[in-house]
Image: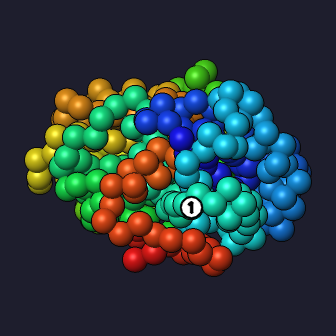
């Protein structure tokens, strides 16, 4: 029975996971506090995590109908993420681990996004993973559950960040992804936008696409907001699909896993599932795509079979990348 904490960015989340089953996954979203600033304010995030973490912990235990004494392991995100925010979750997790005298499992947030898929699907190696969130855009090859071979990465902004910035350009507010998706529903694909670094297999780039959207909005064409949103969203879908297909053509994979906040986007989920040349496309359910603690618990369960369990640490790893914590 794993009690998991996630506080790497702007969601305070606690979950109880047992044998691949998510018994509870409680979350306090700080969005309304950060909204007025147009993005996440790190210091505010840390303070809000500290304020809400014990409330969310209580809710997670109640929703799972378990007691602290039923817990066998504590799992916590140790990076990548905002340093002050990560430390709040780690402090709570370390305290409980010592108080209850049970092991703590430090978890890589990116592994959490990937293993979120385990809630519904079995992993089938070799797998290829596309992770697109507010901080990362990567294609990763997994030959087994602990090998993370980075095939492509963004050279500038992350895909989700581009959604957030485009939403701001269109005055939709923060966070942008769901708002752009909503507006795109009534839009036409009539705004010409570039496909940056199309010929390079190992890099994504989203900063030029953001500029192109800004230029289109300011142009004499007077495109409507919903057309801009729809065209941008489809261009992102196309960029992700094109790069993934390149690797599918090059090597043989049993499974494609799509994960991270951007894959909460229904249009992008459907487009990639339909166009890519691979049968097994596994995507976590919508609520497990964006940040949550259940995915950290699911990753911790995988870590239990690793020969070297990472141990208690008081320092976090804001720039952890894809590394297994503790190695
Ligand atoms: O995975 P996540 O919750 O946090 C990070 O680890 O970054 O991803 C958040 C990102 C934000 O940039 C948000 O705009 C984007 O995912 N996102 C979406 C959607 N929902 C969230 N992007 C496109 N469409 C959505 N429906
Ligand atoms: Zn995340």
In the picture, residue 118 is in which quadrant?
top left
Residue 214 in percent (x, y) is at 64, 54
For image coordinates 72% across by 60% down, the residue present is 99
Is the CB of the residue bearing disc 1 within 8 angstroms of ligand 2?
no
The spot of residue 241 in percent (x, y) is 32, 43
In depth, the one of 218 and 101 nearer the eye is 101
Measuring from the top left, give residue 37's x and y in whole percent: 85, 57
**Is residue 286 positioned above or below 212 on the image?**
above
Viewed as shown, does residue 255 lie left or right of 212? left
Task: Please tell me which residue lies in front, 6 or 216.
Answer: 6
Q: Residues within 10 Å of mark 1 (few under 14, many from 20)?
A: many
Helix, strand, or loop for circle 1? strand
Q: Position of residue 202 (x, y in %)?
A: 29, 65
13 vs 321, nearest the viewer:
13
What colour scheme governs how the chains and residues are painted in the rendered image of this protein?
rainbow
Count of all numbered marks drawn on residues in the image: 1
Identity of the residue furthest to the top in this view = 186
Residue at 43 percent of width and 35 percent of height? 20
Quarter holding the N terminus?
top right
Q: Where the C terminus falls, by quadrant?
A: bottom left
Q: Residue at x 80, y 56 (%)?
A: 49
- Residue 229 showing in the rendered view: no
Residue 91, located in which quarter of the rendered image?
Answer: bottom right
Residue 56 horizontal side relative to residue 13, left or right: right
Q: Is residue 113 left or right of residue 79?
A: left
Q: Residue at x 70, y 37 (%)?
A: 67
- Relative to 135, does residue 191 appear above or below in the rendering? above
Q: State whether residue 147 appears in this view.
A: yes
**Vertical position of residue 187 compared to residue 61: above or below:** above
- The residue to which callout 1 is attached is 104
Q: Nearer the viewer, residue 138 or 22?
A: 22
């Amino acid at each position: 029975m794993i009690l998991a904490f996630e506080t790497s960015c702007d969601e305070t989340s606690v979950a109880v996971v047992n044998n691949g089953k998510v018994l509870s996954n409680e979350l306090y979203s700080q969005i309304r506090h950060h909204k007025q600033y147009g993005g996440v304010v790190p210091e505010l995030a840390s303070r809000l995590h500290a304020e809400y973490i014990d409330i969310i912990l209580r809710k997670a235990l109640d929703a799972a109908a378990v007691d602290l004494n039923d817990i066998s392991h504590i799992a916590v995100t140790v990076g990548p993420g905002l340093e002050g925010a990560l430390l709040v979750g780690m402090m709570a997790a370390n305290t409980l681990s010592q108080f209850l005298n049970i092991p703590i499992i430090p978890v890589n947030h990116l592994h959490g996004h990937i293993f979120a898929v385990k809630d519904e699907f079995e992993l089938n190696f070799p797998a290829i993973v596309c992770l697109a969130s507010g901080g990362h855009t990567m294609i990763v090859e997994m030959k087994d559950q602990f090998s993370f071979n980075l095939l492509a990465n963004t050279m500038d902004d992350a895909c989700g960040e581009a959604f957030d910035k485009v939403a701001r350009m269109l005055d939709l507010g923060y966070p942008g992804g769901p708002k752009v998706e909503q507006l795109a529903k009534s839009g036409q694909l009539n705004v010409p936008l570039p496909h940056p670094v199309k010929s390079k297999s190992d890099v994504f780039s989203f900063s030029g696409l953001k500029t192109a959207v800004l230029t289109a909005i300011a142009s004499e064409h007077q495109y409507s907001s919903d057309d801009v949103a729809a065209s941008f969203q489809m261009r992102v879908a196309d960029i992700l699909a094109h790069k993934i297909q390149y690797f599918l053509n090059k090597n043989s994979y049993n499974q494609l896993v799509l994960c991270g906040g951007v894959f909460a986007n229904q249009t992008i989920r459907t487009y990639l599932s339909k166009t890519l040349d691979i049968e097994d496309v596994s995507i976590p359910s919508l609520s497990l795509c964006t940040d949550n603690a259940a995915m950290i618990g699911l990753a911790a369960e995988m870590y239990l079979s690793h020969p070297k369990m990472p141990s208690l640490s008081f320092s976090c790893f804001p720039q952890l990348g894809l590394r297994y914590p503790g190695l």
